[in-house]
Amino acid sequence: MQVEVTVFATLRRYLPGLPIGGSRQMDVQPGTTIADLMHTLGLPAEEVKVVMRNHLQAELCDSVEDGDRIAYIPAVAGG
Amino acid sequence: MAKKILRINMSNLKATYEAVPEKWARWAGRGLTSSIVFDEVDPTCHPLGPNNKLVIAPGWVTGSPAAPSSGRCSFGGKSPLTGGIKESNSGGMCGQKIAKLGLAAIILEGQPADKKWYTLVITKDGVAFESADKLVGKGMYDVAAAMEAKYPKTALIGIGQAGEMKLSNAGISVNDPEYSPGRYAGRGGLGAVMGARYVKAIIVDDSGGPGVEIADKELFTKGRKALAAAISEHALTKKDGGLNAYGTAVLVNILNEAGALPTRNFSSGHFDTAAKTSGEAIAEAVEKRGGGMMGHGCHPGCIIQCSNIFPDEDGNVLVSKIEYETTWSLGANCGIDDLDYIAAATKECNDIGLDSIEGGNTIAIAMEGGLLEFGDSKGALKLFDEIRKGTPLGRILGQGVEATAKAFGVYRVPTVKGQSMPAYEPRAVKGIGVTYATTPMGADHTAGYTIAPEIAGVGGKVDPLSDEGKGDLSLAFQATTAFIDSTGYCLFIAFPILDIAEGFGGMVESVAGVTGLKITGDDVVPLGKEILKMERLFNESAGFTAADDRPPEFMRDEMLPPHNVNWTISDEVLDGVFGWVHAD
């Protein structure tokens, strides 16, 4: 099955070539979790502060499903 | 030497130095501006009349040696935009210099009978009242150039044409270390309150000033070091962390991902091309074009350095800085994704002396009202020129969102207490909506930044779409914020100290060390609530009721894409946030 992944800000360095605001399609096995995907992408766990699944707050232990969009977010805030 | 209050009376052009009365002695920053406004300003007065005052107060630790990121300065008065009490604070050069002159606060009151404009020059020797005839009608970039030539290495507090015209969206400019006038106590129209005193500019020269006394140097040093360590360690605030590398606009893509980036006058939470206006895009342009910088500090001693200097395509400096709020209000909320326009419009706001949140939102209202199309950046720039020139249309736009919405028959008006909402959609992030609705300031994200746990996972993790617990969450943030706004520390220290306990303790110790106040971490929320209580009581006396603590009607009725959510938090919850004011 396929999922769409994206990363922001300081995490972009781990997906070189990804355009700002862009995403990448990935083939994954059923039962894959957001944490599994994070490791596959080479994203250091200590740099991932928040994950979103289909624009909703999610947990690293959540499984992904076909067609999901997963976003990895580092420490951000401001205003 | 004990700190003094400097009272400047524009009716008779007299300046007097007063001992700080006991009732104000423990306050600084927002706590002091709100105390003075509460005690001295009639809540029913006209904001532009002779009975309003502009109060300027640096924080407790501002100006003390090596307290990190502590250059904030509070500006207070009765707001022409909201009709309630207002505290708006700014970075830049003025806070530290006022504090180093030994001043707890400056109170600007009265009005000159002849309505002549003045520049006030404040030094260790007193206040000089100079004619501002040559500055009248000028924007803040020209004012800054003239003042830097005459008074180099000083702080400049000033108003552009908007403040001269006493428009409700006039902010107060403060210069940065490069003497650029882009730091703003922007919200709530305090520039009009300064204009109504006929003060175009204030120069603060701290040469030879007494500096800031430290009551307990050992405690202060221990506290400031613990705080600095937390700031330097946290992924958000450390060097090359999110804020340092990308500025506050790092949030654009995140809020867009969360479906909470207000778009086209709060009609959607998602803007397809928001990435073009993001912190990542700003950083990329700065790197490719040259001539600008990321990681710029707005005042000496800031170790977060979230500011930037944005260049044009040829590498010439265009403006400092493009904030999250600015890139959003002028960008996504107007359906515009052109960073060069956003930079140019930001510069217009800085120059004319407009709050860029209210300014961008006003353009969006004009778009919804049919004056121009969403996405029309060229048309938008012309509207800023109307404001600068003070044309009838410009004067309507300069009054902000509510006045413009009335003029153009717009129903979707994203305001609370007359002040328009910042860059977080309350239907998709409920806690910040509670803050918008209930803070005494009018819709203001900085008054209780629940975004930290709701979006950023800082200080815990809370579902942004859930209603549960949002009243208590907002109050906790509002009370803590009122305290931090009194310290002189940048509000962004809240992120590391929410996650790192030693940093929180260090902040409190540094305040106790400077002031000699016997306070601990347990006193933060109670002291913050004391400030909030004064502000709420002022607003009640000004005529505010529970009906003023509500988000706009359309947010209950209209579903917000992409999550298709509306405002669902009950009025009872909103009324409960400040229920303690009369129960205690």
Image: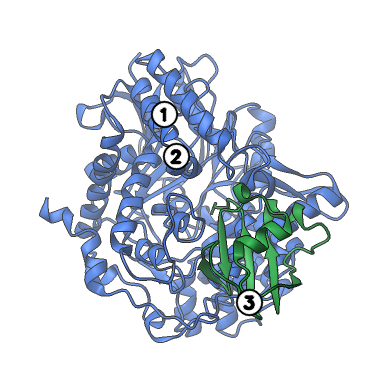
Chain colours: A green, B blue
Name the residue beneath numbered marker 2. Answer: B497
Left or right of residue B44: residue A37: right
- Compared with B34, B272 (above or below) is below
Left or right of residue B475: residue B394: right
Q: Residue furthest left?
A: B583
Q: Residue furthest right?
A: B314
Which chain letter goes with mark 2? B
Q: Residue at x 27, y 44 (%)?
A: B531
Q: Is residue B174 visible?
A: yes
Q: Secondary structure at mark 2?
A: helix
- Residues at discs 3 and 2 both on one chain: no
Give percent across and percent down for residue B466: 38, 71
- Compared with B20, B396 (above or below) is below
Contact, mark 1 vs mark 2 (Cβ under 8 Å): yes
Which chain letter goes with mark 1? B
Name the residue beneath numbered marker 1. Answer: B506
Circle 3: residue type:
Asp
Q: Which of pointers 1 and 3 indicates the residue nearer the eye?
A: 3
Circle 1: residue type:
Gly
- Residues at discs 1 and 2 both on one chain: yes
Name the residue beneath numbered marker 3. Answer: A68
Q: CA distance from mark 3 to mark 2?
A: 34 Å
Toward which corner of the image does residue A5 lie, by quadrant?
A: bottom right
Mark 2, other Cα within 10 Å: few <14 / some 14–19 / many ≥20: many
* Quarter occupied by the N terminus of chain B: top left
Give percent across and percent down for residue B574: 27, 67
Give percent across and percent down for residue B252: 62, 62
